[in-house]
Image (spheres, helix red, strand yellow):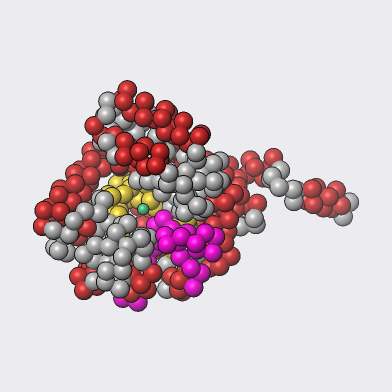
C-alpha cells in the first residue's frame, strides 16, 4: 500500500496539458510499431516535377512538398493510398480522351516511381498485404482515383485501372461530372446520374472501395443506399467543426458508420480559407510546376513561403485538426475514424506541416485516453477492414 499515494500524486500531476516525458516516449514507441496509413496522398502530383526525387528529403517552405521517403520514415508513415487525380474538364469526347490519357500517364508515373525505388516501396492491392510490406521496411503503395471523369462514358475502363492495382475511387471532384454532383457543384443531377448508379454497381462488382469525399450530400446518400459494401470518405471532416460543403453533418457521419464505413479526417476546411487575389496568382503559377526548372521551382517556393508569412491561407493549427478528429471519435467511435490529411493536395496546418509530424497525433490520442488498439484501428485497421469488405464483395 505504501507506494500508492505518491503514485496517485504523480498521476494527478500528469493531467497537465502536455504529456509527461514517460508518456511521450511511450507514444513515440507506440507510433513506431503501429501500421500507419494515410488514405489520400496527392504526392503523385509531384512525380513529374523536373528534378524531384521521392528519395530526397524536401521541405514545405523550400520545396512545396509534404511527403517523401525520408519524412515518411521519420514520421512513421508506412504508406497509404496514392492518388491518381484528374482535374475536372469538359464533358465532351475530347475532354474524356484527354482526361483518360492524363490519368493513365499518372498511373504510369506511379508505377515508374515504385519500380525505381523497389528497395523502399511496394504496391499493395489487398488488405492482408500491408503488414508484411511494412515489416520488410518498405512503404506501402495502394492506389486510388480522385475523380472518375477520365472513365468518360466507358465503365469498362474501371477494370483497366483495377488491373493496374487501383482499389479505391471517388466519382467526382470539385465540379459536377457525368457520374455525380460534387459538394461544390451546381446540383446537376440531384445526386448520382443514371451512369453514376451503374458506376456504383461496377465498383461493387470489381471489389473496389467507393470514396465519397467530394460527393455532394445527395450523392453520398444515394451511394450509401446503393453500395453493397461500406463507403470511405478518404479526406473529409465534420460540419460541426466548420460549416463548409466539403464537410459532413453529424447525421451523415453516423449513417456512414452504421453501415460499417469510415471517415478519414482531412487537414483542410477546418476554418475559413483566404482565397485572396495574391493566393490565386500563386496557385496559377503552381499549375505550371511541371514545366519549371529546379531553379524556377525554388523561386516559386520562396514566393509561396513569403505569401504564407504575409497572409496565411488558413488559421487552423494542429489542435484545430485534433478537434476534428476527436469530434468524430466521440460521435461514432474508434472503429469509424481515420486520417486522410490531403498531403500534397492542400493539407497541412500550423504545427503539422508535413508527414514528419504524424507521431503528434498518436501522442494526442493517448493523452485523450484512447488505447493502443483503438489507435491501431484509427491509423490503419478501419481502412483495411473497409478494403477487405470491398474485396469480399467482388463478384465471383
Ligand atoms: Zn480532394
Percent across and percent down for residue 77 are: 45, 43
From the viewer's perspective, tell me whether residue 184 is left or right of residue 205: right
Q: Is residue 201 visible?
A: no
Q: Is residue 208 magenta?
A: no
Q: Is residue 229 magenta?
A: yes
Q: What residue do we see at 83% from left, 50% from top?
A: 9
From the viewer's perspective, tell me whether residue 330 is left or right of residue 355: right
Percent across and percent down for residue 200 are: 26, 69
From the viewer's perspective, tell me whether residue 370 is left or right of residue 89: right
Q: Is residue 355 above or below residue 291?
A: below
Percent across and percent down for residue 100 are: 16, 52
Per the rendered image, the range of residues in magenta is 223-251
Q: What residue do we see at 36% from left, 72% from top?
A: 218
Q: What residue do we see at 31% from left, 49% from top?
A: 83
Q: What residue do we see at 33% from left, 48% from top?
A: 82
Nearest the eye: 72 or 324: 324
Most extreme residue toward the right, as rendered? 2
Q: Is residue 81 above or below residue 203?
A: above
Residue 207 location, quadrant: bottom left
Percent across and percent down for residue 84 are: 27, 49
Q: Is residue 196 above or below residue 270?
A: below
Amino acid at each position: 500500500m505504501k507506494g500508492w499515494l505518491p503514485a496517485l500524486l504523480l498521476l494527478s500531476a500528469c493531467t497537465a496539458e502536455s504529456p509527461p516525458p514517460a508518456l511521450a516516449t511511450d507514444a513515440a514507441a507506440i507510433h513506431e510499431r503501429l501500421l500507419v496509413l494515410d488514405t489520400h496522398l496527392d504526392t503523385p502530383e509531384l512525380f513529374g516535377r523536373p528534378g524531384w526525387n521521392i528519395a530526397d528529403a524536401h521541405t514545405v517552405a523550400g520545396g512545396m512538398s509534404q511527403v517523401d521517403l525520408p519524412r515518411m520514415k521519420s514520421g512513421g508513415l508506412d504508406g497509404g493510398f496514392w492518388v491518381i487525380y484528374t482535374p475536372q474538364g469538359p464533358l465532351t469526347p475530347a475532354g474524356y480522351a484527354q482526361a483518360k490519357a492524363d490519368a493513365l500517364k499518372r498511373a504510369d508515373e506511379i508505377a515508374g516511381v515504385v519500380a525505381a525505388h523497389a528497395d523502399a516501396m511496394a504496391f499493395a492491392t489487398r488488405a492482408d498485404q500491408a503488414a508484411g510490406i511494412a515489416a520488410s521496411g518498405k512503404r506501402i503503395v495502394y492506389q486510388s482515383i480522385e475523380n472518375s471523369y477520365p472513365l468518360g462514358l466507358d465503365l469498362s475502363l474501371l477494370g483497366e485501372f483495377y488491373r493496374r492495382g487501383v482499389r479505391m475511387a471517388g466519382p467526382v471532384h470539385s465540379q459536377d461530372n457525368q457520374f455525380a454532383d460534387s459538394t461544390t457543384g451546381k446540383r446537376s443531377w440531384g445526386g448520382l446520374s443514371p451512369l453514376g448508379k451503374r458506376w456504383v454497381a461496377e465498383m461493387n462488382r470489381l471489389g473496389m472501395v467507393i470514396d465519397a469525399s467530394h460527393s455532394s450530400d445527395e450523392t453520398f446518400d444515394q451511394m450509401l443506399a446503393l453500395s453493397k459494401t461500406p463507403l470511405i470518405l478518404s479526406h473529409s471532416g465534420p460540419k460541426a467543426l466548420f460549416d463548409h460543403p466539403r464537410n459532413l453533418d453529424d447525421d451523415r457521419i453516423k449513417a456512414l458508420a452504421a453501415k460499417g464505413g469510415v471517415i478519414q479526417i482531412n487537414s483542410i476546411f477546418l476554418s475559413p480559407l483566404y482565397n485572396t487575389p495574391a493566393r490565386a496568382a500563386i496557385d496559377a503559377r503552381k499549375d505550371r510546376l511541371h514545366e519549371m526548372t529546379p531553379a524556377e521551382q525554388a523561386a516559386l517556393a520562396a514566393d509561396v513561403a513569403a505569401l504564407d508569412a504575409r497572409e496565411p491561407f488558413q488559421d487552423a493549427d494542429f489542435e484545430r485538426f485534433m478537434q476534428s478528429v476527436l469530434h468524430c471519435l466521440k460521435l461514432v467511435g474508434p472503429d469509424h475514424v481515420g486520417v486522410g490529411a490531403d498531403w500534397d493536395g492542400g493539407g497541412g496546418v500550423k504545427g503539422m506541416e508535413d508527414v514528419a509530424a504524424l507521431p503528434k497525433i498518436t501522442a494526442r490520442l493517448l493523452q485523450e485516453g484512447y488505447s493502443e488498439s483503438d489507435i491501431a484501428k484509427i491509423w490503419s485497421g478501419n481502412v483495411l477492414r473497409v478494403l477487405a469488405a470491398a474485396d469480399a464483395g467482388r463478384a465471383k
